[in-house]
Image (tube, helix red, strand yellow):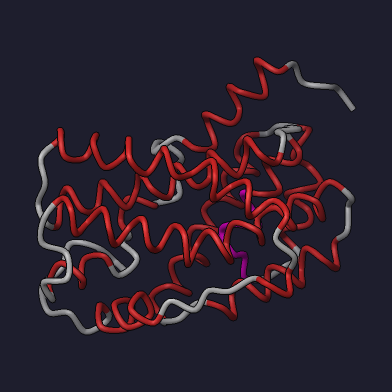
Amino acid sequence: MRILSSSLQLARLLQLASPALPVGAYTYSQGLEWAVESGVIRDEASAGCWIADLLAHGIGRYEAPLLVALMAAWTGGNRSEIARLNGEFLASRESAELRAETVQMGFSLHRLVRDLRDPALADVEATLAGLGEIAFPTGWAGIAAAWQIVPEAALTAYLWAWAENQVMAALKAVPLGQASGQRLLAELGGRIPAVAAAALTLPESQWSNFTPAFAIACARHETQYSRLFRS
């Protein structure tokens, strides 16, 4: 196996975390749009509170440590563990829209793996092909592991990409100005290292995605009359 230089690993990581990644992430708000409709999010401060709370108590305590476990399974070639964690994530989605979101993005990521024609991703493509429905973190972790990205860096970038997408959704839905968006990203970016560090060592027995307000927002969005986003 060819060892990638640290500079190439960084370039690959930036590619994975880029908004240009063709998986359709920009079309989803993960319930944020309903939170705006209901008045829970109404300005920069309330948007920052919503996203920061979800980062710390939702994605940081479930999706983030699951991504770390997936990367370990991919690195070790443990297909049964990859399948188990993929199934666990699909089962954890609180609403039909959230489940459809991760499956659609996972499908798009699998297609991208094939279209990249990178020999380093051949095993990732074959493993994903055998999963049926693919959760987005499963495919993302597989690419990150195949590209030899350090788990801490990969997780930091994954969390950043999620936070950036949430802020972009807030800019459109509230709406907020560009300066507000940059202030939010600066604040969220400052929180990400601690969230990532905790997720790296969090045992599975302590994983939790218990975020009732988030689950309600996602479920209510499914019947929201006027909306910009798919979730």
Q: Nearer the viewer, residue 64 or 16?
A: 64
Q: Is residue 146 left or right of residue 172?
A: right
Q: Is residue 103 left or right of residue 164?
A: right
Name the image quarter holding residue 215: bottom left
Q: Position of residue 5 (x, y in %)?
A: 74, 16
Name the image quarter holding residue 183: top left
User: On the rendered image, what quadrant is the C terminus found in?
Assistant: bottom left
Q: Position of residue 54 (x, y in %)?
A: 40, 63
Predominant SS along the magenta part: helix
Taking the spot 38% from the left edge, 48% from the top edge, the residue there is 163
Q: Is residue 10 above or below residue 210?
A: above
Q: Position of residue 82 (x, y in %)?
A: 77, 63
The magenta span reads: 133-140
Taking the spot 15% from the left edge, 68% from the top edge, the residue there is 227
Q: Is residue 190 above or below residue 10?
A: below
Q: Is residue 162 left or right of residue 6?
A: left
Does the magenta portion include 45? no
User: On the rendered image, what quadrant is the N terminus found in?
Assistant: top right
Q: Nearer the viewer, residue 200 or 163?
A: 200
Does the magenta portion include 136? yes
Q: Position of residue 95 (x, y in %)?
A: 41, 82
Taking the spot 9% from the left edge, 51% from the top edge, the residue there is 175
Q: Nearer the viewer, residue 43 or 228?
A: 43
Name the image quarter holding residue 43: bottom left
Q: Is residue 218 above or below residue 14?
A: below
Taking the spot 53% from the left edge, 59% from the top edge, the residue there is 60
Q: Is residue 222 above or below residue 188?
A: below
